[in-house]
Amino acid sequence: MKRFLYAATAALMVCASASHADEGMWTFHGFPFAKANAALKTSLDQAWLDRVRSATVRLSNCTASFVSGEGLILTNHHCVEACLAEQSSKEKSYVEDGFLAKTREEEKKCQTQVADVLVGMEEITAKITAATAGKTEAAANEVRKSTLTQLEGECEKATNQKCQSVTLYEGGQYWLYKYKRYTDVRLVFAPEASIAAFGGDPDNFQFPRWCLDMGMLRAYEDGKPATPAAFLKINFAGPAAGEPVFVSGHPGATDRGLTLAQLKQQRNLDLPQWLLRASEIRGRLIQFSASSPQNERITADLLNGLENGIKVRRKMLDALHEDTLLARKAAEQATLEKNIKKNAALKKSTGNPWHDIDVALAAERGIFQPLNYIENGAGFQGRLVNYARTLVRGTVEREKPNGERFREFTDGALKRVEQNLGAAVPVYPELEELRLGASLERMREWLGPDHPLVRKLLSTESPAALAKRLVTTTKLADPAVRLELWKGGSAAVAASNDPLIVLARTIDPDARAVRKTFEDNVEAPMRSATERIARARFATLGTSVYPDATFTLRLNYGTVQGWNENGTPVEPFTKLSRAFERATGADPFRIPDSWQKVKDKLDMNTPFNLSTNNDIVGGNSGSPLINAKGELVGLLFDGNIHSISGSFWFDTEKNRAIAVHPAIMREALAKVYGADALLKELAK
């Protein structure tokens, strides 16, 4: 649902294209109109595609869509949960209680949210190829990044848009995507968490489901509701079984193009390590949450995301233990290698990238723990310590020429950095202490007490004591203090005696060193190897296959359908009546009082959730489900349990996407929440 397949060889992809027409997260500059229209008996054209693109929104964490001409945005409840938490306190939780702005004046600004709409796409592969030609792997890696930064900067100056470089086909193509960005995004509506995520973690990635996982935002421009170039009219009748439907959204990341060795590294190292850390902190958060109603409120958003991530990665790990998946990848790789050897010129230009990847993976294993805990922050968890690390590193990077900076601090990224630093979001010291203390403990365990940085930080204090001292004495919970340091630059940060700033200054040299080792010995040779593999694929397939997901806009086509689970048919629709039958009165199977009070007025035959065979992964949360007329007929919020393996491959027989049916949205807005103004706006 929130985490992040393309089959690689000629023989397998041709077969897949013919028999599994629903597979594929297609770019908007490479959508296969002829194939889709032939498979679905539709008549999509470029005008349809352009309107859908203009109505689809990328949030910082999810997908969404404009659903009115007044900037109204529809997405998932779990996609606005962070904004709800920002508005909440220990005494009042909008995550639990929901929110409805009766008037525009009551809409609450989401301080860390942005909304982007893709307005242009430009291929820049030739420019990157020319810039890196003839250079060593490490030098090419540096030049590639600086060139991408340069092109982004030139694009933003020329267009006054947000420009982002996009890597496709594991480095086989580079594009510049141009976005219209809205930075004033306000909260309009969200139901209670108990109905938005009815069934909670036990039902997560299950179907049948009964979740009103919806939320509404509004984009503003110059203080007024934005007027989008296009919006999707909601068809509250929804789709019929078997009807063609399309998902326009931003799938986060897939690994369908990875080599067999890369997948095994995920299985043997990356995923198990992440699950160990996440499972422990989940246990601590559950214990903390259970100690008081206040702690439960301030932990809900964090715990929900963590539990979701654990389930996703656990099933990804299961998928990587499937012999059929690994056999498929081995066959794909062997076929491609065989095709390369048949062509002398291709063999010479490709070399042996699989060997080079193996060498890079071995180098990554050698630095995995320090990279993970020091540079990637697994040893320094919490909002406050992240502020400190951003200030220390960002102020130094900002003073370098734009092309020489880390990519997260280029000119194009600085506005977003400042927005996050200046956001007056609630900070709860007891939660910060728990997270920082626990992560320091794990860093000491995995790096060892004799690691130089561990000794530097923990030679006289325990992890818990250090975390307590840092959190209780820092001033970084105040956004004014953060912004003063940010605007003061590296001199102000270097002079600061704030204990978390001191900690971040201590960490940064070690973090930079291990990052440099990673970039030169892992990232650079890996990128060189994957680009050569991509060129070899293009030599036999061209670009007739779709690239792995990169949290950039994609379109997928499918139909409304269920599946067969161990001989039992699973129908594609659920109804409201079954939610009340399933309710126990206790979380996570509790229907909120607002629904119970109007139960007699509700139409129990109202469709609630539906399933389709669209190819989706995390990042597609909040994506509009669209019919051939270009109407919104559903709101994607999840996949079934089989869909999690979609990070690596697509099974057309069992992978299913799950959406909120628009009929239940109207039923809830009209009869439960009295959102008459919203319904009137949606009817325009």
Image (cartoon, helix red, strand yellow):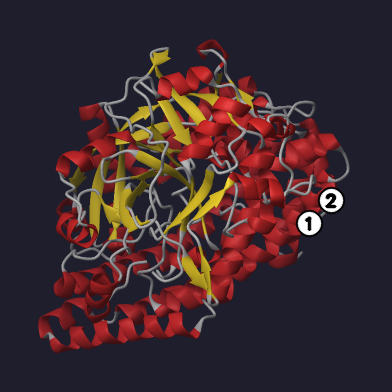
Q: Residue at x 62, y 61 (%)?
A: 311
Between 148 and 233, the one lying in front of the other is 233
Q: Which disc, if any, is residue 287?
A: 2
Answer with left or right where residue 457 lies relative to residue 336: right
Q: Quadrant of the C terminus?
A: top left
At label 2, counting other C-alpha atoms closer than 10 Å, the crowd grade (few under 14, some 14-19, many 20 or more) is: few
The foreground one among 66 and 432 is 66
Q: In the rendered view, tell whether residue 401 sits above or below residue 229.
A: below
Q: Position of residue 188 (x, y in %)?
A: 53, 24
Residue sitting at x 34%, y 80%: 354
Q: Position of residue 607 (x, y in %)?
A: 52, 45
Which residue is outermost to the right? 291
Q: Please state which amino acid type lies under the numbered disc 1.
A: Gly
Please state the horizontal and vertical placement of residue 484, each as a whole percent of the image.
Answer: 58, 21
**Residue 169 spot, x, y in % from top left:** 28, 62
Residue 466 located left or right of residue 246? right
Q: Is residue 379 visible?
A: no
Quarter residue 228 falls in = top left
Secondary structure of the residue carrying tag 1 is: helix
142 vs 683, nearest the viewer:
683
Asked whether, in this view, residue 130 is left or right of residue 205, the answer is left
Element under disc 2:
helix
Q: Residues within 10 Å of mark 1 (few under 14, many from 20)?
A: few
Q: Is residue 313 left or right of residue 622?
A: right
* Disc 1 + disc 2, Cβ < 8 Å: yes
Residue 384 seen: yes
Q: Which residue is mark 1?
A: 283
Q: Nearer the viewer, residue 370 or 53?
A: 53
